[in-house]
Image: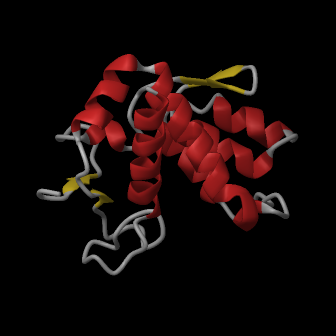
C-alpha cells in the first residue's frame, strides 16, 4: 500500500483533498464555490440560510455559518451528513479531470485528513479520530476507478 497520504492545508501537498480547496462544484442546479460551501449549506436545506452559506466569501466563512449552533440544523443531519459529503466529493473529483487524475494517482494509499481540529472527519492529529473524510475519499477513488 505504501506510505499513507496525509493532507489538510490547501497550500501544501495534497491540499486539493481539502474541502476548502478552491474547486467549484455543480450540484442541485447551482454552482457551489467549494465542497465545503455545499456541505455546510446542506445543514439548512430549503431555508434562506442555505443560500447564505452558498454565497459566503470563503470556505472558512461557510464553515463558520454552518458550525454556528444558533442556526438550527435540519432534523436528519446526523443521518445524512456522510451521504452529503460523499455527493460533494464525487462531484468535485468527477467534475475536475485534473483532480480525478491526482486522486487515481494515489493508487491504494491510505488517505488521511491529518488535523487535531477534527476527530470525526479527520484523524484527530494523533490517529485517534475516525478520518471519515479520508475514508470517503478512498471510497470515491474506488468508485471512479470502477466506472472507468
Across and down, in percent, residue 120 comes to: 48, 70
Please name the residue shown 18% across and 41% down the image: 12
In the shown orientation, is residue 102 left or right of residue 62? left
**Colouring method of the image:** secondary structure
Across and down, in percent, residue 77 comes to: 75, 61
Question: From the viewer's perspective, is residue 105 above or below residue 26?
Answer: below
In the shown orientation, is residue 46 left or right of residue 79? right
Across and down, in percent, residue 85 comes to: 58, 48
The quarter in which the N terminus is drawn is: bottom left
Please name the residue shown 19% across and 59% down the image: 4
Please name the residue shown 31% across and 36% down the image: 103
Residue 125 seen in the current view: yes
Farthest left residue in view: 2
Question: From the viewer's perspective, is residue 108 above or below residue 57?
Answer: below
The quarter in which the C terminus is drawn is: top left
Please name the residue shown 45% across and 36% down the image: 146
Q: Nearer the viewer, residue 12 or 100?
A: 100
In the shown orientation, is residue 94 left or right of residue 52? left
How many numbered markers are drawn?
0
Q: Nearer the viewer, residue 94 or 76?
A: 94
**Residue 114: quadrant of the picture:** bottom left
Residue 19 seen in the current view: no
Amino acid at each position: 500500500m505504501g506510505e499513507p497520504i496525509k493532507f489538510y492545508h490547501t497550500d501544501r501537498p495534497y491540499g486539493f483533498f481539502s474541502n476548502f480547496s478552491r474547486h467549484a462544484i455543480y450540484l442541485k442546479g447551482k454552482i457551489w464555490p467549494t465542497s465545503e460551501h455545499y456541505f455546510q449549506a446542506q445543514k439548512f436545506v430549503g431555508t434562506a440560510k442555505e443560500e447564505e452559506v452558498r454565497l459566503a466569501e470563503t470556505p472558512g466563512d461557510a464553515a463558520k455559518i454552518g458550525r454556528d449552533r444558533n442556526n438550527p440544523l435540519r432534523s436528519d443531519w446526523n443521518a445524512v451528513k456522510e451521504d452529503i459529503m460523499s455527493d460533494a466529493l464525487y462531484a468535485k473529483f468527477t467534475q475536475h479531470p485534473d483532480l480525478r487524475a491526482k486522486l487515481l494517482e494515489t493508487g491504494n494509499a491510505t488517505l488521511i485528513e491529518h488535523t487535531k481540529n477534527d476527530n470525526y472527519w479527520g484523524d484527530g492529529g494523533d490517529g485517534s479520530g475516525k478520518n471519515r473524510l479520508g475514508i470517503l475519499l478512498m471510497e470515491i477513488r474506488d468508485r471512479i476507478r470502477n466506472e472507468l
